[in-house]
Amino acid sequence: MSEENEELSIEARISRWRLVLGSSAQSKLDGMRGGGAILNDAESVMDRALAAIYDDTGNNKDAMQDKKSLAGLGPSYPNLATWLSDIRLYFPKDIVSVLQKDAMEKKGLKELLLEPESLAAAAPDVNMVSTLLALKEYIPKKSKEQARALVKALVDEVMRQMEHEMRRAVVGALNRKQHSPIPSLPNLDWKKTISKNLKNYSVEERRLIPEKFYFFENRHANKEWHIILDMDQSGSMCESIIYASIMGSIFASMPSLDSRIVAFDTQVVDLTDSCGNDPVDILFGVQLGGGTDINKSVSYCAQFVEVPKKTMFILITDLYEGGVEAGLLRQLKELMESGVLVLVLLAISDTGIPSYDERLAQKIANIGIVCFACTPSKLPELIGGALKGDNLKDLMNRVKI
């Protein structure tokens, strides 16, 4: 390594330590540098952005407490939109999410999310949208359009990632189980045709001579399954609700499924008719926070079960029950024993193992109902596998966080 490159490497290290340690380390690092500015222009912007959240000294702290001047993102930042623009320019996407989350939690910036210019500049990540949904009752008229646009941006992004695989999994589970006597090459079930005709393999000719061909049925508009999505809308479940709402809207758009979407805390809200096809409407229809009465919601949903063996009931909750626990267990058991496919989803999250009532989860497992926790990318495999009749315990191990 040349002397010049070695010097540059030392400078880079000093600059990084300055960004990590903040302004309190300036004087000590100046002595190590041997003259010249420690931070270049871009690094200075990064430093101010980091100091706005993590530096609790001097004027910056006072400014943070003044929400009219950006709850204090410092005198160099006239508004939150500028700060958001800076961090999006100089930091990677995953770091932007962390900075936004820390800004909201550490510096009381939640109110600032309700300003139009702040919402317009915000990156559409799950943490940001979760906070926005929790505050939606306080969104002023001037910010409603920008708030909805931010939520829609996240929904569209997740929809692009999820929709194709979810549709393919559901269609594969439903339409590939029934075979048709009508021959059609595009609908040929190669796997079953080969499997059933292996006995007719000709060693001399080195080829399979089928006696019978098997064809899949074409898709049709009849409702083959009824899916009831029952979502716990307590504040801790917000991330799961975002993904569940998108999943529910995909179900609602599929002609082979009859879907019902319900949200609950201590009260039950049926979102099916008002916004079942639009995940953004679903999200703005939930009320994050409050207590939890899972038993009441299950009782409400049970009335819509008409053909148990063609009904999937998906309960999304952390199982912190504020209602009648014994009634909840009884109703879940009755649904399962009647033939309903019951899935309990503890979380749909990328953030790790969820917090939930392990005691109640064990009681539910004891009556034969499997409790799942999975990432959004595993949802298609979970739903498709359940509809195909896969062993649910094996399925749980395949999709668990």
Image (spheres, grey):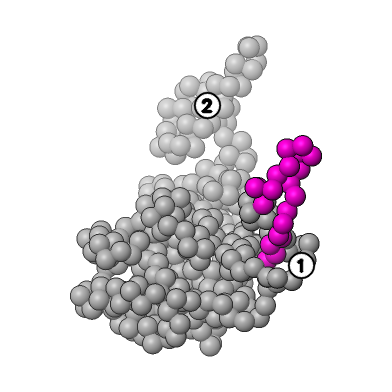
Does 131 sit left or right of 94 as displayed? left
Assign a secondary structure to mark 2: helix
**Count of marks placed on residues:** 2
Question: Which of the 4 image quadrants contains residue 330?
Answer: bottom left
Q: In the drawing, what numbered circle is on residue 183?
A: 1
Q: Is residue 216 above or below residue 398?
A: below
Residue 151 shows in this picture = no
Choose mark 2 or mark 1, whichever is in front. Answer: 1
Identified by mark 2, the residue type is Arg
Question: Which of the 4 image quadrants contains residue 277?
Answer: bottom right
Residue marked by disc 2: 13
Farthest residue toward the top? 2
**Is residue 360 or residue 124 the one in the foreground?**
360
Q: Where's the N terminus, which quadrant? A: top right
Report how far apart the C-alphas of labels 2 and 1 lie in the structure: 69 Å
Does 288 sit left or right of 89 as displayed? left
Q: Which residue does the image show at 59% across and 62% down from the upper left?
A: 169
Q: Which residues are magenta?
A: 197-216
Assign a secondary structure to mark 1: loop
**Is residue 299 or residue 215 the one in the foreground?**
215
Identified by mark 1, the residue type is Pro
